[in-house]
Structure formats: structure tokens, C-alpha cells
């Protein structure tokens, strides 16, 4: 087993950050591993595997989640104004598992891995990467 923490920064309140190349480098350094488990550490972040060929996909995902969980209308907003970020994180989910083969992530042709920040900007977001 090998574990790494990838520290990320976001520049917007809601952002999908492509981490595929960073994860590829980790996988290549451990060709014996068969699985890569990803976990977004934080109650307002998530992990998503999605297309990255067309940038409009990221925009559409954020807009879809804004419609599903609009800002400013939830009970938790009275606490710190980020209830929508918690809901979006829960909808997308904090984890993903990717099969590996000889140091290669077995993603489909159009699939990339995104760290989702729904309560940015932040400079200290963490993605825990565990190789088994």
C-alpha cells in the first residue's frame, strides 16, 4: 500500500480541477498497484470522473449543481453561508476508485479525474490517494 496527499488550490467558489496528470504520475511510480482509491478530504469538496475534452462539460456540471442546490436557501446557510457547497459535495461524492494496470490508470478515452471544490477559493484542499 502507498498513500499520498495531493494538496490543491482553487481560484473560484465552485471549481472542477483536473488532477489526472498528477494521478498518472503517482500511478506510474507504482506499477505494482492494482487500484487507486481517491478521497476528497473536506465536507465541501468531492471527486468526479468526467469528460475533459470539451470545457463546456465542466461549466454544465457546475450550472446543473447550482440549479439542484442553489445558494442561500438552506437552513445551514444561517451558520456559515455554504449549505449549497455541502449539498453539492454530497451529490457528487467524496471518493472514486480507479483500476490500474502496470502503472496505467484504466480510464476511458474521454475520462479525466476532477477534484471538485464547492466552497472556494482555498489554498489547502487535500486529495488522499491510496494505491493498493
Image (spheres, rainbow, N blue to C red):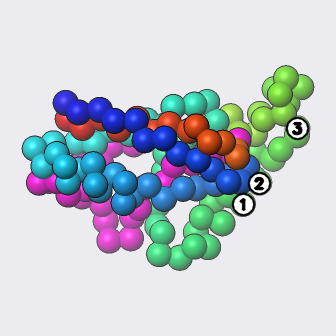
Q: In which image quadrant can residue 12 be found?
A: bottom right
| Picture quarter with the C terminus | top left
Element class at badge 2:
helix
Question: Circle 2 sits on which residue?
Answer: 67
Residue occupying the point 11% across, 54% down: 102
SS label for mark 3: loop
In the rendered image, is residue 35 in sight?
A: yes
Could you give the CA–CA distance between mark 3 and mark 1, rounded to whole angstroms? 17 Å
Q: Which of 96 and 30 is in front in this view?
A: 30
Q: Give the magenta-colored segment's residue range.
A: 91-119
What label sits on residue 73 in the rendered view? 3
Q: Quadrant of the N terminus?
A: top left
What x and y, as percent, mark residue 128?
Answer: 40, 35
Q: Where is residue 26 drawn, in percent x and y?
A: 27, 48
* Residue shown at 29% from the left, 32% from the top: 3
* Residue nearer the viewer, 62 or 16: 16
Splitting the image into 4 quarters, where does residue 34 fall? Answer: top left
Q: Which residue occupies the extreme top position in the image?
A: 79
Are the residues at dot 2 and dot 1 in contact (C-beta closer than 8 Å)? yes
Task: Give neighbour class at mark 3: few <14, some 14-19, many 20+ (Cα, 10 Å).
Answer: few
Spatial CA distance of label 2 from label 1 is 6 Å
Q: Label 1: state its secondary structure.
A: helix
The residue indicated by pointer 1 is 63
Residue furthest front as drawn = 123
Whether the magenta-drawn stretch holds residue 73 is answered as: no
Q: Which residue is drawn at 49% across and 45% down?
A: 47
Amino acid at each position: 500500500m502507498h498513500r499520498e496527499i495531493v494538496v490543491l488550490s482553487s481560484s473560484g467558489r465552485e471549481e472542477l480541477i483536473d488532477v489526472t496528470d498528477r494521478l498518472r504520475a503517482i500511478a506510474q511510480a507504482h506499477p505494482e498497484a492494482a487500484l487507486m482509491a481517491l478521497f476528497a478530504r473536506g465536507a465541501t469538496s468531492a471527486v468526479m470522473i468526467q469528460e475533459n475534452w470539451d470545457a463546456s462539460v465542466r461549466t454544465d456540471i457546475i450550472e446543473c449543481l447550482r440549479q439542484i442546490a442553489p445558494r442561500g436557501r438552506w437552513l445551514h446557510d444561517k451558520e456559515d453561508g455554504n449549505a449549497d457547497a455541502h449539498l453539492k459535495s454530497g451529490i457528487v461524492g467524496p471518493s472514486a476508485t480507479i483500476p490500474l494496470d502496470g502503472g496505467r490508470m484504466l480510464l476511458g478515452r474521454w475520462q479525466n479525474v476532477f477534484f471538485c471544490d464547492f466552497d472556494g477559493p482555498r489554498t489547502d484542499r487535500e486529495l488522499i490517494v491510496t494505491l493498493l
